[in-house]
Amino acid sequence: MPMQTLDREVVIIGSGPAGLTAAIYSARANLKPLLIDAPPDAEKQTTPGGQLMITTDVENYPGFASGIQGPELMVQFRAQAERFGTEFLEEWISEADLSERPFRLQTDNYIINAETLIIATGASAKWLGIPGEAKVPNGFGGNGVSACATCDGPLPGFRNEELVVVGGGDTAMEEATFLTRYASKVYLIHRRDKLRASKIMQDKAFKNNKIEFVWNTAMEEILGDAETGVTGVRLHNLQSGEKRVLPCAGVFIAIGHKPNTDLFKGQLEMDEVGYIKTSHRSTATNVPGVFACGDVQDATYRQAVTAAGTGCMAALDSERFLDHLPIATLEGDEITIEGEHITPDHKAIIEPDGSMIPNQPAEMAAEKD
């Protein structure tokens, strides 16, 4: 069958809090956004709705005084986006060409031309790949296993309990230190006898009497049952060969995140890890008309509420761009859909042909004459 072609003003990739918020704002602006997300795939660990689909209690998203289940929150997000007319498409995107507008995306069944593109593909936590780590019902993910201490650490099931953190970098030190606010004790499991974390983060962890380091040790299995959740971990000392079970009520995997940006490598500016670089004044990337929001461009906060906030920003930036209004770029200037550049001091406009015109009211120009 021939490929079907879709032409849209706004295309959003990703259906987590960032992508769905962008969809809500774009749809309310009557831009008829198309939201594309990867189909559910257990092997590739893709779930429409993002990381909150494998989170149980969400207690820190504003507006839900008694908390809400992660999947239910995302159902509400999607229903709101659908209410205003967002179009949804579950397809794997095999190619993306951002060299010119309209931007071209290709799937198995469609060629999609986008006047503006909002990337909200998120970042995936890195996992160990051990038994018991997978999400429920195949493991204890969401029932005692987490990759976000800030999200899940304050939950009642972890309070005054002994917890385990796995990792040796800054993320692991930060997660372990944060968890000591709630846990009775935190065991930090590391495969080596030295940490990769920065000195300041190491010092904070070493000085915390609630943290106990377990060196030269690998975690081989997470133990528990469906009713209780996590009850312990099976450890293997890599020097002595000793194996033992360490009782605990929760396991936090803190070995880093990988932004889902492989599709755009070589086309968008990224940092050394792969997070998309955006302007400090907007969600604009180095390609005019392409915007990034949520965890795909945020290596620091990685929260649902911050992702939703940048999703709002991306939608407004996209709307401004389509309305031929200037958008802040990585370089500090601003650019319009026609290719006009406004200098950082706002005193001049550089047109696509290279000519420069003053960007000031006529009366100001007359006074200078």
Image (spheres, rainbow, N blue to C red):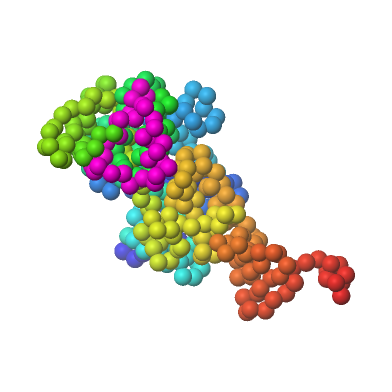
**Residue 237 picture location, percent across and down:** 16, 37
Left or right: 84 with respect to 202?
A: right
Is residue 194 a member of the stretch shown in magenta?
yes
Left or right: 80 with respect to 145?
A: right
Nearest the eye: 84 or 208: 208
Which corner quadrant of the image does residue 217 belong to?
Answer: top left
- What range of the chain is rendered magenta? 183-212
Left or right: 235 with respect to 306?
A: left
Q: Quadrant of the C terminus?
A: bottom right
Q: Is residue 54 visible?
A: no
| 297 over 42 or under it: above or below | below
Nearest the eye: 73 or 114: 73
**Residue 197 picture location, percent across and down:** 36, 45
Residue sitting at x 49%, y 50%: 293
**Residue 284 picture location, percent across and down:** 54, 58
Residue sitting at x 60%, y 52%: 316
Q: Quadrant of the N terminus?
A: bottom left
Q: Is residue 269 visible?
A: yes
Is residue 170 a member of the stretch shown in magenta?
no
**Residue 363 picture location, percent across and down:** 86, 67
Residue sitting at x 33%, y 25%: 185
Left or right: 340 with respect to 121?
A: right
| 97 over 74 or under it: above or below | below
Count every numbered label the image shows and give the total.
0
